[in-house]
Amino acid sequence: MASSSLPFTSLHLQFVSPNTKSPTTRLSSRRIRASVSEKPPVPAPAVAVPAKGETKLPLKKIPGNYGVPIVGPFKDRLDYFYNQGRDEFFKSKIQKYNSTVFRTNMPPGPFISQDPKVVALLDGKSFPVLFDVTKVEKKDLFTGTYMPSTDLTGGYRILSYLDPSEPTHARLKQLLFFLLKSRRDHVIPEFQASYSELFETLEKEVAEKGKSSFQTANDQAGFNFLCRAFFGSNPPDTKLGTDGPSLISKWVLFQLGPVLKLGLPKYVEELLIHTFPLPPALVKKDYQRLYDFFYESSGSIQDEAEKLGISREEACHNMLFATCFNSFGGMKIFFPNMLKWIGRAGVKLHNRLATEIRSAIRSNGGKLTMAAMEQMPLMKSVVYEALRIEPPVPLQYGRAKKDIVIESHDAVFQVKQGEMLFGFQPFATKDPKIFERAEEFVGERFMGEEGEKLLKHVIWSNGPETQQPTLGNKQCAGKDFVVLMSRLLVVELFRRYDSFDIEVGKSALGAAVTVTSLKRASF
């Protein structure tokens, strides 16, 4: 996920999450049983312009405005975080302007972001322009309209902040490809080992206390898995111990705090994290502990980096970021969300998954392999549906390299060179003009020939699921790795259990899932 924007906003951090209980995070929960979900402005005169095929859409002026400097961005920030909330903030503007493309300000605004003005793209047709690096620049836009201090990343601009036009981008992305390829044989066995520990922890705590936090167990299991699979190093056996997840959470907060809602009193939160950046010096020692661990564990990757013309230090900072921010962050956000949707889907889906998964494994000699997983169409569809309905990378940004034309379903809009484009992915992936029952979790949605055609609209990775990351684009280098990890979680879950019960709450990072029962496999 290293090339995707802001992996942690539900925070893909896709990657920030405290490993320990945070006094700043408030949770509200409700029990989920697995057995049971102003008038628009007058548009400018329409000019007919050809679109795809023979369709002609009107050329319109982009509606909306940015308000008075400082005051307008501040008001939009309060509406986004508190007065309306994120989703309602966007919905209200769509209704106000009768358009899924409009002008607005995006947080954080004053005084962290110098220019919060964006053109919002909130439908599945306009959103993909953000993937076209011939039209948009991605330089320093990973976290949006502001960029965290490079003091948080060893003084380096990490791969996620580089545009493909920059020479270092290709070298660093090539290094990630090398890491993923060279360690691919370790992924399945290390995942099984790490998540066997997770399930044993959940079972023990449910038996003793009647419930167990999935987040806490997932944080440690996920970090251990990534370090074992990528670097052959087990954190608990090193000086880092079990502190990795908590150190990462604090470090990510210093980067993503300006776009997070932690649950503090409004004006305390505004002053603490939304108005001025947190001083990097406060996490310098924590980051150094992480860096020392990765430097000692990634020698072979550093050797390869030198061959590519990258210093060992820059390579290490990038490996740390890719593992802790991108990959760990993604697992921390997406795994609980996926568990939430599968839990809500109910026992019928659980039974179908358990039957399919166990049958495929038996037919492959009782061993889980890549070939066995290819024989699990429902399982694969469920993972894609979870990525569609609640993508771990909700926000995307790009700056227009030149004057361009953008199409929504209803109109064509002209964007000037230098303007910032912003896309809110959950609206694009739940576009009712693309997906039937778009707001529902439909486990079998991507099965069969017709279902597979829809995969081009699954775009969590900063590109369509039907395309692959290259040195010249910003699609997530670990796209296929993330899908594999997610499939492995579903497979391991239903190898062991027929069904499960959960409670779902809310936190700054997305869903807070508590497991309340696990029904062991009966067939």
Image (spheres, rainbow, N blue to C red):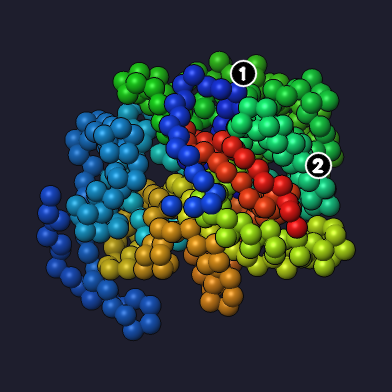
Q: Which mark is residue 191?
A: none
Closer to the eye: label 1 or 2? 2
Question: Count the marks: how many?
Answer: 2
Q: Which residue is mark 1?
A: 284
Q: Is residue 437 above or below residue 238?
A: below
Identify the residue at image location x=57%, y=27%.
Answer: 18
Identify the residue at image location x=44%, y=46%.
Answer: 395
Q: Is residue 419 left or right of residue 277?
A: left
Q: Residue furthest right?
A: 365
Residue type at tag 2: Ala
Circles 1 and 2: CB distance less than 8 Å? no
The front one of 113 and 507 is: 507
Residue type at tag 1: Lys
Q: Which mark is residue 193?
A: 2
Expressed as whole percent of the image width and height from the top left, the position of residue 356 reads: 70, 64
Which class describes the residues within 10 Å of circle 2: few (<14), some (14-19), or many (20+)? some
Q: Quadrant of the C terminus?
A: bottom right
Identify the residue at image location x=34%, y=21%.
Answer: 265
One can see residue 37 in this view: yes
The front one of 27 and 78 is: 27
Expressed as whole percent of the image width and height from the top left, the position of residue 499 reads: 63, 50
The front one of 193 and 51 is: 193
Q: Is residue 232 above or below residue 519?
A: above
One can see residue 485 in this view: no
The front one of 222 and 408 is: 222
Q: Quadrant of residue 45?
A: bottom left
Q: Dot 1 lies on which element?
A: helix
Identify the residue at image location x=40%, y=65%.
Answer: 437
Expressed as whole percent of the image width and height from the top left, the position of residue 101 reads: 30, 57
Which class describes the residues within 10 Å of circle 1: few (<14), some (14-19), or many (20+)? some
Q: Dot 2 lies on which element?
A: helix
Q: Earlier in the sequence, mark 1 or mark 2?
A: 2
